[in-house]
Amino acid sequence: MFKLLIASLFLLSTLIASVAHAEIKKTAIVDKFISKMVTEHHFERRELEKLFKSVDIKPKIIAAMQRPAEGMPWYKYRKIFLQDKRIKGGVKFWQENQVSLAAMRKKHGVPEEIMVAIIGVETLYGARTGGYKVINALATLGFEYPKRSQFFLSELEHFLLLCREEKMNPLKPVGSYAGAMGMPQFMPSSYRHYAADFEGDGQRDIWHNPADSIASVANYFAKHHWQPEQEIAFPVTAVSGLHKQALTDGLKPDFNAAQLRALRVQLPAEMLNNQPLKLFSFTQKKGYDLWVGLDNFYVITRYNHSKLYAMAVFQLSKAIKKRYMAGHHAKN
């Protein structure tokens, strides 16, 4: 009886393990991807086939992709990021990295609090960078998640290229369930295009080096046309239902101030009529809040294509700066 129980438990653990991960099957899509890497980028077919034998498909990654936080209403989403722990952590991160933050603000015009808030929202200042092998995440979503297969196969391609360029073992880097890496959670294509070397030591270490991570975030924003010294967003009110005509899809400014005023949206008197704006509605427990986003709000959405994400970064940045400045004045 005891032996039977042990055998049953062993069989159960084996089944659980097989559900948790599985080796990549040699399918047409895998063979096509390998052929592309060989033909276009001169990889060795035998080496890639050997590499993929060490790659696991993770079904729980697909499950995680199907329940993103951005599907929440704003009042719930906000609570994840506008917490005292994250605000205090942001102040501490700013204090510990004043030199690199100030240098990047001077170089690119991106405010310190925005760079800090991005890293705070993404990984709690490096504390939560993910526990999945990047290659497992990208292979799972590229080969087994048809809905977004094209995107993740492209990222897998970039990942193998960056590993070759940076002389990294593809089985070593660890990141999120979507394959995002390091403190700023760069996807492989973003790493290749925007990761920066702050000290000039030949390394772009976004996993362990806060200065490189800060420089990478600032470079990303600059390359997406951040406008120094310009506003990001502000709350507004509307005195009739006409404003609903401006609650359009998309994230890029698609109305100007004159058009919103004509829809009875109350804007600051000093705002020029030709200023491009985007009207957003954010769901509260009761009713909704109206906000206007400017070009810099749109730039934040280039990091994550969500108005909820951009608003969380913006509001966290304001909270961090307020507390940082209060502490700074108190010391003086």
Image (tube, helix red, strand yellow):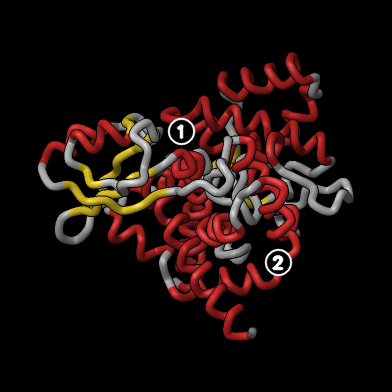
- Element type at mark 2: helix
Neighbour class for label 2 at 10 Å: few (<14), some, many (≥20)? few
299 relative position to 174: left or right = left
Residue topped by disc 2: 98
Marks 2 and 1 close (CB-CB < 8 Å): no
Where is 106 relative to 50, above or below?
Answer: below
Residue topped by disc 1: 145
Q: Residue at x 58, y 31 (%)?
A: 25
* Real-space Cα separation, disc 2 to disc 1, in angstroms: 42 Å
- Taking depth in this image into account, of 67 and 32 the one nearest to the observer is 67
Q: Residue at x 21, y 51 (%)?
A: 237
Residue 118 spot, x, y in % from top left: 55, 55
Task: Please name the amino acid that badge 1 sits on.
Answer: Tyr
Q: Residue at x 62, y 18 (%)?
A: 32
Q: Residue at x 82, y 40 (%)?
A: 166
Residue 127 spot, x, y in % from top left: 60, 66
Q: Looking at the rendering, in which quadrant would you find the C terminus? A: bottom right
- Element type at mark 1: loop
Please report whichever mark, 2 or 1, sits nearer to the chain's N-terminal start: 2
164 relative position to 97: left or right = right
Where is 224 relative to 111, above or below?
Answer: above
